[in-house]
Every structure is written in C-alpha cells, then in structure tokens.
C-alpha cells in the first residue's frame, strides 16, 4: 500500500503564480550527504592482487577492486614426443586436446567416436568436463602417447 505524502512535500511541488501572472516551476531542495571524516579504505595489493582487470572492455569503466585470478586453461598431460597436449579449460568447463600438427586419421576417429568436437577457432578437440570425461580423456592421452593405461605412477 502506498504511503501518504506529507503536506510540506505536496505544497513544495505545486506551481506558484506571481502578481504578473507568470508561473514558476516548483523547486526542490536536495541535501548533500555529509563528507566522511575518515579516508576511504583500500585493500593492500597482497590481499586482492594487483588493482587491474585484464578482461575489461575498453569502452567501459574498469573495476579496480576485482581479483586477478589465474589463467583459465591448465595443461594436464604433455607429450612433446607425439606433439600433443591434454588440458582443461576451467572457464568453459571443457577437457581439451591440442595437437601441434593434424593428428592421424585413427586418432581423429577415436576422438569423434568418444564425443569430442573440433573447434577450429582454438584448433582444439574439446568435450564437456565431468568425472566420466575426465577419466576418458586421461585414458586417451595415455593411449595417444603410447603409454600403458592403468599403471600406477
């Protein structure tokens, strides 16, 4: 239910007519908040990280208090001998296979039959990360590298 206006506010918002017949618009006085008697607090850089954001669009204002998180991609398995890398992109919650050169046809067929999708922009084979696909991608990485799967470290 709406509140009733106070009489002082109603009187202040009405137009007034002067002796010459001209009308004047209502004027409203706005009180400025008092200035704080203390300096604003800023968190030291060692708590929140550096005071900048790398992913802020250039046309908008920067958020100086945002945290500087680590990179979203993390390499998990790298085979320099075979020329591929398996990792996880935490931003998009995906497991990723990156190949230096185009993989062999049997590798491509294995990735396709296990549900991986090729992303031409990233030049990577990806699949949604969940417990099953994490285990699957680790097994495939071992298979592509020529290691025996199931051995303990």
Image (cartoon, grey):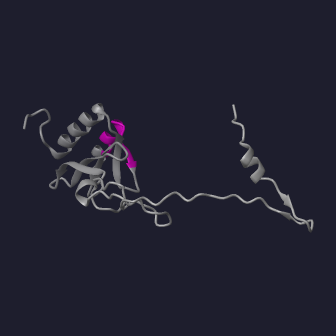
- Quarter of the rendering containing residue 111: top left
Q: Quadrant of residue 42?
A: bottom left
Q: Residue furthest left?
A: 153
* Towards the viewer: 128 or 37: 37
Residue 2 magenta-drawn? no
Q: Examine the rendered structure and indicate whether residue 134 appears above or below residue 18.
A: above
In the depicted view, which residue is nearer to us: 81 or 30? 30
Report whether 123 appears left or right of 59: left
Q: Position of residue 122 (x, y in %)?
A: 37, 55
From the image, which quarter does the C terminus lie in? top left
Which residue shows up at 17% across the image and 51% down it? 79
Q: Residue furthest front?
A: 19
Q: Single out the residue that lies furthest toward the bottom.
A: 20
Check the picture and name the quadrant holding the N terminus: top right
Across and down, in percent, residue 147 comes to 12, 41
Compared to residue 113, the image places residue 107 above or below, namely below
- Region in magenta: 108-118
Tell me: 143 left or right of 68: left
- Magenta stretch: residue 115 in it? yes
| Residue nearest the observer in this picture, 142 or 105 | 142
Residue at screen point 40% across, 51% down: 119
Q: Where in the figure is residue 137, as x and y percent of width and height?
A: 26, 39
How many discs appear? 0
The residue depicted at 9 percent of the width and 34 percent of the height is 151
Residue drawn at (92%, 68%) of the image: 20
């Amino acid at each position: 239910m709406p509140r009733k206006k106070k009489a002082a506010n109603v009187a202040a918002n009405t137009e007034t007519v002067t002796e010459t017949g001209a009308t004047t618009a209502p004027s409203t006085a706005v009180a400025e908040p008092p200035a704080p008697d203390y300096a604003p607090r800023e968190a030291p850089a060692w708590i929140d990280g550096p005071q900048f954001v790398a992913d802020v669009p250039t046309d908008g204002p920067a958020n100086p208090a945002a945290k500087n998180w680590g990179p979203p991609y993390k390499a998990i398995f790298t085979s320099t001998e075979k020329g591929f890398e398996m990792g996880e992109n935490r931003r998009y919650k995906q497991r990723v296979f990156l190949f230096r050169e185009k993989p062999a046809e049997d590798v491509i067929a294995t990735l396709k039959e296990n549900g991986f999708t090729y992303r031409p922009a990233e030049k990577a084979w990806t699949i949604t990360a969940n417990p099953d696909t994490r285990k699957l991608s680790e097994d495939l990485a071992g298979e592509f590298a020529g290691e025996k799967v199931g051995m303990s470290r």
